[in-house]
Image: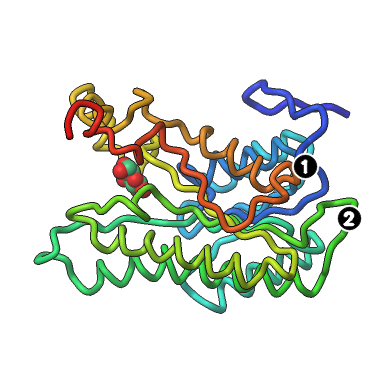
Amino acid sequence: METSGSDGRQPLAHPLLKGQKALVTGANSGIGKATAIGLGRAGADVVVNYVAGRDAAEDVVREIESFGVRAYAHEADVSQEKQVSDMVDRMVQKFGTIDVMVANAGLQRDAPLTDMTMAQWQKVLDVNLTGQFLCAREAAKEFMRRGVVPEVSRSVGKIICMSSVHQIIPWAGHVNYASSKGGVQMLMATLAQELAPHRIRVNAVAPGAIRTPINRSAWDTPEAEADLLRLVPYDRVGDPDDIANVVAALASDLFDYVVGTTLYVDGGMTLFPGFATGG
Ligand code: BGC
C-alpha cells in the first residue's frame, strides 16, 4: 500500500533505500532530523538517536512511520563507548542488522582562544570526533559480521560522516569545532581506505550554512542573513532537506563507486567567494 508522509509528499516510486536499515545520530533536530526523515521517505527503516529531547525524537519517529517503514527512538550519548555499542546491539536485535550509519551528532561551544575552557574544547572533540569514531567502529563490526546481501545493496554497508565546510575553512573563535571537523575529514579518509576492501563505503557530507538551531544567530534577522549570504555564491541559506537528499543518494547504490569522498553541500561557500571581486 502506498502511503504519503505527513508533509503530503509521496514516497519514491522505487524507493532508493528499500529494505535498508539506517541509524542517524542526533536525529531529533536540524540536519539529523531531516536526514532521518529523508532516509525513511527513501524506504529505509530508521533508528532516531538523540541525547536529550525525547518528545522531539518521538515526533520524528511518527513522521518516518507515516511512510510505511519502521522507526524507533534511542537515547544515547555518542561520546560514550558503551552507549554506542548498546545502541547498535539493540538495533541488530530489533531490525536484524544495520546498512547505513549516519554519524551526524555534533555541537558547537564557541569562544575566542584565550577564553576557551578545557571543558569547551573537550566536549566538542568528544561528541564531534570521538563520537564518529565510535559509531563507525560499531557499525563496521556488524557490516563485517553480516557480509553482502545482494538483494539489499551492492556494498556491505555505508558510513556517512557529517562534516562541515570547516573541515577546510579555518574559523576564528571556533578552534574546537574547526579542529573536530578537520579530524572528521581524516577519520573519514583513513576509514575509507581501511574498509573499502571489505566493501564498506565511507564518505562525508560537508554542509555549509544550513538553517538549523546550531547557527540561528547567523540567519534569524534580515541583517544577519544578508551578512551570511556574502559568503554563499548561490545566494540562499541551505535547508536541512538539501543535506538529507544528498545523504539518501550517497547511501544508495546509485553512488556505489563513491568511496572516501567529501560531498560539499554549501551553495559554493568553499569557492573563496571573496575572490569574486578581489584578488
Ligand atoms: C556550522 C554553522 C555555520 C556553517 C557555515 C557549520 O558547520 O555548524 O554554525 O553557519 O558551518 O559557516
Q: What element carries label 1?
A: loop
Sequence-first tag of 2 and 1: 1
**Residue 262 at x, y percent in the picture:** 51, 51
Viewer-closest of 106 and 140: 140
Q: Tell which residue pokes out farthest to the bottom in this image.
A: 82
Which residue is at 74% across, 54% downward? 21
Quadrant (top left, top right, bottom left, bottom right) of the C terminus:
top left
Q: What residue type is labelled 1?
A: Val
The reply to whether residue 49 is in sight is no
Judging by the rendered image, the residue that carries numbered circle 2 is 150
Residue 225 drawn above or below residue 210? above
**Residue 134 at x, y percent in the picture:** 54, 72
Some atom of ligand 1 lies within 8 Å of the CB belonging to the residue at label 2: no
Which residue is at 39% across, 70% downward? 126
Q: Residues within 10 Å of mark 2 (few under 14, many from 20)?
A: few
**Residue 30 at x, y percent in the picture:** 45, 42
Judging by the rendered image, the residue that carries numbered circle 1 is 69
Residue 133 drawn above or below residue 277? below
Q: What element carries label 2?
A: loop
**Residue 206 at x, y percent in the picture:** 45, 47
Cβ atoms under marks 2 and 1 closer than 8 Å: no
Q: Which of marks 2 and 1 is in front?
A: 2
Viewer-closest of 13 and 32: 13
Which of the 4 image quadrants contains residue 227?
top left
Residue 45 drawn above or below residue 84? above
Which residue is at 40% across, 37% downward? 210
Which residue is at 22% across, 34% downward? 274
The reply to whether residue 101 is in sight is yes
